[in-house]
Image (spheres, rainbow, N blue to C red):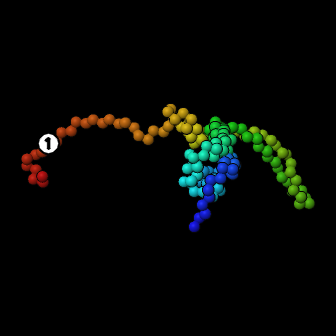
Amino acid sequence: MARKTKYDPKTFPQLAGKFASQGLSDKQIAKNLGISTFSYYAYLKKYPKFAQALKKGKAPVDLEVENAVYKASCGYFVDETTSEIRVDPQGVEKTYNKIKKQKWVPPNMTAAIFWLSNRDRDRWQARVTQDVNLTADVSVTFDKEDKDL
C-alpha cells in the first residue's frame, strides 16, 4: 500500500518550485513530492503559495522553451568550428586548420506552425471542419413494366 503524504506548507512550495524550475512535468513533480496527481491538482486549488511557487518555478523554463521555439521557427546562425586531424609519421594525431564559420540553420516549419497557432489562435488555428453546402435536383422515374420492383 502506498504511503500517503500530507501537504507540508514549509517544504511543498519550495520543493515544487525547485522541481518546476528543472523542467519537470506536473506528473513528475507530484511523484517527487510523494503525492498523486489528483492531490497535486487539489493542492494547486487549495494552497495559493503552492500554486505561486510552481508558477514562479515554471516561468524561466517556459520562457527558455518559448524563445527556442521562436528561434527555430525563424531560423538562426550557429557558430561551427571544423578542424583537420592528421597523423604524423610517428603515429601521433595533430589538429590543423581550425576554421570557425557561421552556419545557417533554416526555419523549422513545424515550430513556426506551432508558434503561430498558439500565439494568434484566431488567425492561425488549424481548421478541421469546413462548412459545405451542396444542392442538387434529383428526379426518379419508374417504368411500370419493370418487374424487379
Residue at image mark 1: 141
Residue 56: x %, y % from top left: 67, 42
Residue 45: x percent and y percent? 56, 45
- Residue most toward the left? 145
Q: Is 62 or 29 nearer to us in this picture?
A: 29
Q: For the point 62% across and 51% down, which residue is it?
A: 25
> From where the camera sits, is residue 66 visible?
yes
Q: Is residue 134 left or right of residue 79?
A: left
* Residue lying furthest bottom: 1
Q: Amino acid at mark 1?
A: Thr
Tell me which residue sits at (89%, 58%) in the image. 92
Answer whether residue 72 is visible to the viewer in this image: no
- Which element is circle 1 on? loop
Residue 72 position by quadrant? top right
Image coordinates for residue 113, horizontal then vertical, percent: 56, 39
Q: Which of the 4 image quarters holds residue 134?
A: top left
Residue 10: x percent and y percent?
69, 50
Query: How crowded is the residue under tag 1: few (<14 C-alpha within 10 Å), some, or many (20+)?
Result: few
